[in-house]
Amino acid sequence: MPQSGQKTIIAPSLLSADLLNLQTEIDLITKAGADWLHLDIMDGHFVPNLTFGPEFVRQIKKISQLPIDVHLMISPADAFIDAFAKAGASYITIHPEADFHPHRTLQKIKSHGVKAGIALSPGTPIETVYPLLEIIDLILIMTVNPGFSGQKFIAHPLEKLKALRKLIDTHKYPILLEVDGGVDKTTAKEITCAGADVLVTGQYVFSKDMPVSSDVYKSRIEDLRKQ
């Protein structure tokens, strides 16, 4: 679990928000208690979907004070680090499979004063992250395969999460552990007990079956945080 006294960080994924009314959605989710805004950047190449670019980050930065958590599901990622950093990203997370030299790409992220993260897909071995522990600020454990929102939760990556929690606590690495994929009231308890600091949530908070209001969003966020 997160360190004693540290609250779980909730990062709603804007991919699941009403994009035609995005400023309203951001205002409501901020009022509801969201800690970060999560952006899934997909290129239709590394993953079979296409979403946002740096200009989208720049526009969000104009209307929100919340940290912007950018998850790059693009290949190559290295070529776009400067643009996303300059647009206002607070965190930039890459997939090791997306770059020939992930360590160099992480260095480039940090050269902008931006926090650097590495993502582990369900099939990516935990050993991939070991040579990068001294440089990263965040590890994103994917509990779905990257590419689409609304997928069914995959439980086995939590074993990687537990092992990384123990490793980070033992060596006192200043690294946050984030989980993305199928996060809802049912899975949140299992995820936080396994050691997550940050929960990315999309359709559970931005549910199309609920009224759009800060009170509804607050209730969902509190459901996740109290697990």
Image (tube, rainbow, N blue to C red):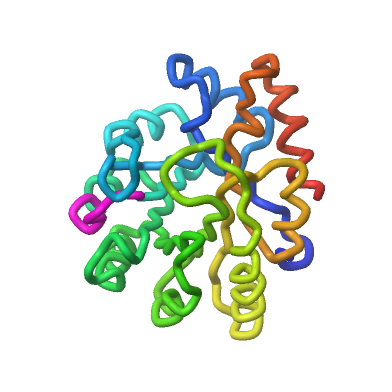
- Give the left or right position of residue 35, taking residue 75 as reference: right
- Identify the residue at image location x=51%, y=39%: 37
Snapshot quadrant of residue 197: bottom right
Q: Nearer the viewer, residue 217 or 60?
A: 217
Residue 20 screen position, x and y as percent: 43, 15
- Give the left or right position of residue 153, taking residue 13 as reference: right
Residue 201 screen position, x and y as percent: 60, 41
Q: Nearer the viewer, residue 69 or 162?
A: 162
Which residue in the rendered view is the most extreme toward the right?
226
- Identify the residue at image location x=73%, y=49%: 187
Snapshot quadrant of residue 206: top right
Q: Is residue 96 magenta?
A: no
- Identify the residue at image location x=74%, y=22%: 215
Magenta highlight range: 73-80
- Give the left or right position of residue 188, taking residue 100 as reference: right
Which residue in the rendered view is the most extreme toward the bottom?
171
Quadrant holding the N terminus: bottom right
